[in-house]
Image (cartoon, rainbow, N blue to C red):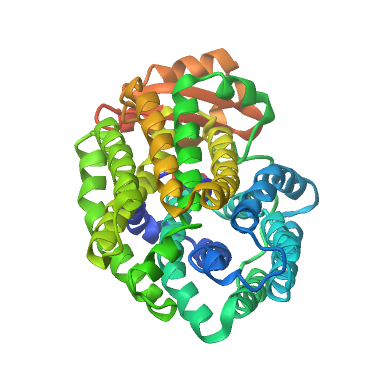
Amino acid sequence: MRSTFGALSPLSSRNSFMSKARLLLASERRAIVGLVGLYATRMLGLFMVLPVLALNADHLVGATPLLVGLALGVYGLTQAVLQIPFGLLSDRIGRKPVIAAGLGLFLIGSVVAAQADSIAMMIVGRSLQGSGAVAAAIMALLADQTREQVRTAAMATIGLSIGVAFGVAMVLGPLVASHFGLAGVFYFTALLAALGMLVLWKLVPPAPRRRGHRDVGLDRGQLASILGRMDLWRMDASIFSLHLILMAIFTAVPFKLVDAGVVEARHGLVYLVVMGLSFVAMVPLVIVAEKKRKMKLMCLGAIATITLSLVGLGLAGSGLVALGAWLLAFFTAFNLLEATLPSMISKLAPAGAKGTAMGVYSTSQFLGAFLGGVMGGFLAQQFGLSAVFLGAALLGLGWFVLMLGMRAPRHLSSEVVALADEHESDTLDNLMARFAAVAGVEDVLVVPEERLAYLKVDRATLDTEALARLTRSSTQRS
């Protein structure tokens, strides 16, 4: 699963961050470590419930497969509704207070869910967990803490941490549940929220709140143009479908493992093997997508693989080997899309609009998670476990057809550069023309009040010397 505002694949983000690590100031390094840890522990707490809730909800009064599915996915609804308001609120009153409040809501929701004796209380607890929608505020604080030349790599590091958190959660959730029950999982997530608060106040340094970050935050003035672009709609539909399918099948996957003879205490071991192998299998596919410029091919191949694996899961018997093979195929394709879809958003979004595009993308992801839980629970209740997988496969088929018309994205990169002092007297049109005249600059947005230029560049043809002459050196940057 992927949150929200990452912009690079895990592989490219790691390389980019390592290459720029030597440029980091001490305060930037401290902020990155703290906020990445905070983001990852919060996502770990959300993901741990995924492989265990459906299997352990039978003791809750009023539990039905539909309501269990609602409990599983309802956090996505409150996340989708509140993430943008929380981000805007952090612009007004400060990042840390908003993040602390969100972590507090997550902690309260975890305790409510841990003490739930009815499915209704569980739904309330999960809703409260999701209402701590602080992803945008965390990313904005990280942007406050970093300079333009290292910010993209810092943001991508958070994206990498989410993938790691998801894999760990899939293993840790069943392990904790087998020893301490479902309540123990939620108490553990409450502990993670408390640790997150400690990290926020003790490790993350204070930072001045800046005017805005168009490469990170949502700009309401750009929203209409972003929503009107079909290429970005396809990306939003993709992350919506991906997380709908993921949430739907986890109303059924734990029961399939039980039918295959795997006791609950060993579910984590199955997920460990599947997730570990899927990450290994994903890496060369990401390389092909990014380095060989085969984004569309890899995207369509992953959607087709997900669809076929869902059919296999729906029709497979109780054999563990077949079940494990189909899960491996599913998660290899899932992880590939989690890595490449944000990168495609970054390539497709206009200059200076990446933050807005990622905000819409993230909202689509959370709405997909919500509807996936409801759909999975409904199909399981009305038609049985196999219907969950086959229904998701039907959605996968429609998704594949939608993406056939997609044009392969150009391999453009986003750059944010500070304006040189001598540009103060230039007109906006003149500045735009001067940046556009640089070889390799494909799109430009100059924001004089921010003293920044947002560029989309083709690194293969970029005239870096000409661009450098238009910007001040890194030692002059604030």
| Residue 112 placement: quadrant | bottom right
Residue 34 visible: no
Instruction: Looking at the picture, tell me which residue is in the foreground, 87 or 457.
Output: 87
Instruction: Looking at the picture, tell me which residue is in the foreground, 201 or 358.
Output: 358
Residue 71: image location, x then y, percent? 64, 58
Side of 43 where 17 appears, left or right: left
| Residue 348 placement: quadrant | top left
Side of 326 where 22 appears, left or right: right
| Residue 399 placement: quadrant | top left
Residue 456: image location, x then y, percent? 41, 28
Residue at position x 54%, y 30% from top?
A: 353
Instruction: Looking at the picture, tell me which residue is in the foreground, 471 or 326.
Output: 326
Residue at position x 50%, y 50% from top?
A: 248
Q: Residue furthest front?
A: 383
**Number of callouts:** 0
Residue 317 visible: yes
Residue 207: image location, x then y, percent? 66, 58
Does 351 appear above or below 195? above
Residue at position x 56%, y 18% from top?
A: 228
Residue 34: image location, x then y, percent? 55, 68
Instruction: Looking at the picture, tell me which residue is in the foreground, 233 or 158.
Output: 233
Side of 384 where 79 appears, left or right: right
Q: Residue furthest bottom?
A: 179
Residue at position x 60%, y 27% from top?
A: 447
